[in-house]
């Protein structure tokens, strides 16, 4: 299915190696907006899903997205142009290293669903590998960029594998970015934690207790918490 219809926008994804998945939707719906961001940056936007969800949720006037893969970049541009908020969405075709060479702006919110498969496994699809594997964007590079581009009161939000959570929080602490919200995600009540949703700010808060989000009770039967989180986006929620 190349077209994915949400309540307020639709997404074409036929040219993207990384299709719309639960991770992107979770981050787009979960990311805290309590600092009322005026400017947002989505690093590694893919189809543009997270940027579009944040355009729907926020009053931001500038939403920039960054995508290194040419096909995905062109797709994101099309998806942005076809959205109700096309006047404030802009996609850059560049790698993170290029983008931070001459930073023009600071951002009140930086989000990323980074490529994070660190296992020594490569498929025969090079485009998908680039989208998928961490060597396309190491955590250190992502955190360095967030530190460089985040405004004083800005929020930096990511979704990563749960097994990488402690390492990621330690790396952020070295850049003086501290967690303000942690949510650990499970597919069902019986399955192990698979993802961590993390949000950071520049000043240290009191110790953050993590909460847990379970997606499904059984196949296609969603928990109340997941429905509450995503109901403004999914047509059938």
Image: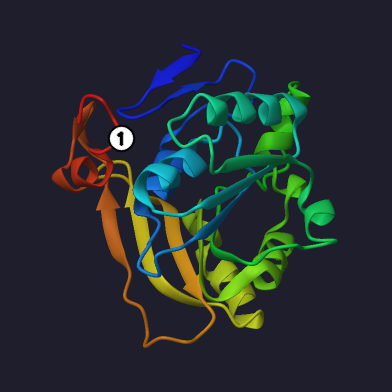
Q: Residues within 10 Å of mark 1 (few under 14, many from 20)?
A: many
Residue 229 lies, with reference to residue 210, above or below; the image says above
Total marks drawn? 1
Would you say 234 lies left or right of 140 here?
Answer: left
Would you say 25 lies left or right of 106 here?
Answer: left
Pinpoint residue 124: horizontal percent, then vertical percent: 76, 21
Pinpoint residue 139: horizontal percent, then vertical percent: 67, 60
Residue 226 lies, with reference to residue 34, above or below; the image says above
Q: Quadrant of the C terminus?
A: top left
Q: Nearer the viewer, residue 7 or 61?
A: 61
Pinpoint residue 58: horizontal percent, then vertical percent: 38, 52
Would you say 230 lies left or right of 11 here?
Answer: left
Q: Nearer the viewer, residue 12 or 170?
A: 12
Pinpoint residue 121: horizontal percent, then vertical percent: 71, 36
Q: Nearer the viewer, residue 196 or 59?
A: 59
Q: How is the image coloured?
A: rainbow
Q: Quadrant of residue 131?
A: top right
| Residue at mark 1 | 233
Q: Residue at 59% of width from left, 80% of height from top?
A: 173
Element marked by disc 1:
loop
Residue that lies at the very extreme toward the front in this rendered image: 87
């Amino acid at each position: 299915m190349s077209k994915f219809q949400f309540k307020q926008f639709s997404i074409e994804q036929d040219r993207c190696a990384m299709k719309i998945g639960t991770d992107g939707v979770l981050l787009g719906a979960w990311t805290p907006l309590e600092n009322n961001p005026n400017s947002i940056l989505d690093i590694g936007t893919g189809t543009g899903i997270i940027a579009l969800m944040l355009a729907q949720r926020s009053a931001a006037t500038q939403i920039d997205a960054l995508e290194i893969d040419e096909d995905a970049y062109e797709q994101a541009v099309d998806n942005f142009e076809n959205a109700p908020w096309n006047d404030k969405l802009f996609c850059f075709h560049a790698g993170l290293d290029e983008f931070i060479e001459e930073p023009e702006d600071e951002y009140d919110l930086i989000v990323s669903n980074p490529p994070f498969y660190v296992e020594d496994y490569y498929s025969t699809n090079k485009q998908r590998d680039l989208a998928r594997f961490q060597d396309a964007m190491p955590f250190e590079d992502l955190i360095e960029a967030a530190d460089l581009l985040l405004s004083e009161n800005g929020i930096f939000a990511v979704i990563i594998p749960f097994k990488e959570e402690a390492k990621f929080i330690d790396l952020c602490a070295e850049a003086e970015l501290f967690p303000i919200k942690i949510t650990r995600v499970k597919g069902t009540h019986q399955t192990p934690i698979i993802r961590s949703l993390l949000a950071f700010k520049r000043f240290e808060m009191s110790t953050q207790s993590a909460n847990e989000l379970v997606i499904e009770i059984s196949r296609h039967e969603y928990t109340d918490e997941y429905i509450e989180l995503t109901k403004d986006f999914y047509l059938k929620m």
